[in-house]
Amino acid sequence: MTINKIQDILFPDDRFMQNLYFIMLCKNEVMFDGIKVEDGVIILDNKNKLSTNSYFNSFYESYWTQYTSLKRFFLKIKFRGRMSVKMYRDEPGAGVRLIKFWKGEPHALAEEVVIDIPSNYVSLVKGRSGRIFFDFVAHSRTEIYDISICSD
């Protein structure tokens, strides 16, 4: 199966702009001093959490399903370290709900993983597919090189 990138998750270096793209949590508290981004790589310390629950880095599934014929989507991550991902769907009238939990094996080298984003055909029929965002939790020091949304 060939997958094609349709949206990049952006990693801004300017720490004053980062809160438009990410929410960073350390010990469940929001960090206001910025995310470590070095040479376009996000660096998470053990137990830090990075969320794309933001305007710029959410995936607006509703637009893709309404204006294209695409129905299957994937999260592609290139990282080194150990982390887990929680996927959430925020639907009009239904609120936010967890749709998938993925826990990866440790990667000593920068490797890519592709994770299926569950479709919600009931909501698609009603036109309520909504917006998807991701929480990335580091289980050791983790370097994230690239995050993107893809489709087949």
Image: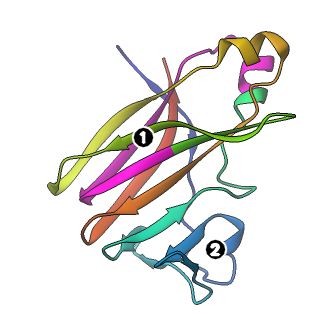
Query: Which residue is at a point 57% across and 83% down the rendered structure image?
Result: 31
Residue type highlighted by circle 1: Phe
User: Which residue corresponds to mark 2?
Assistant: 18
Q: Earlier in the sequence, mark 2 or mark 1?
A: 2
Instruction: Name the residue: 56% across, 52% down.
Output: 9
Give the residues in magenta: 63-86
In the rendered image, which quarter is residue 33 located in?
A: bottom right
The image quarter containing residue 1 is top left
Which residue is rendered at x = 57% and y = 58% of the image? 10
x and y percentages locating residue 83 in the rendered image = 31, 56
SS at mark 1? strand
Q: Nearer the viewer, residue 64 or 124?
A: 124
Q: Nearer the viewer, mark 2 or mark 1?
A: 1
Q: How is the image coloured?
A: rainbow
Q: Position of residue 3 (x, y in %)?
A: 43, 23
| Residue 146 vertical position relative to residue 72 in the rendered view, above or below | below
Q: Above or below — where is 147 with respect to 131?
A: below
Q: Which residue is mark 1?
A: 101
Query: Image point 26% across, 46% down: which residue?
Result: 104
User: Amino acid under label 2?
Assistant: Gln
Taking the view exactly as shown, the residue that stands out farthest to the right is 93
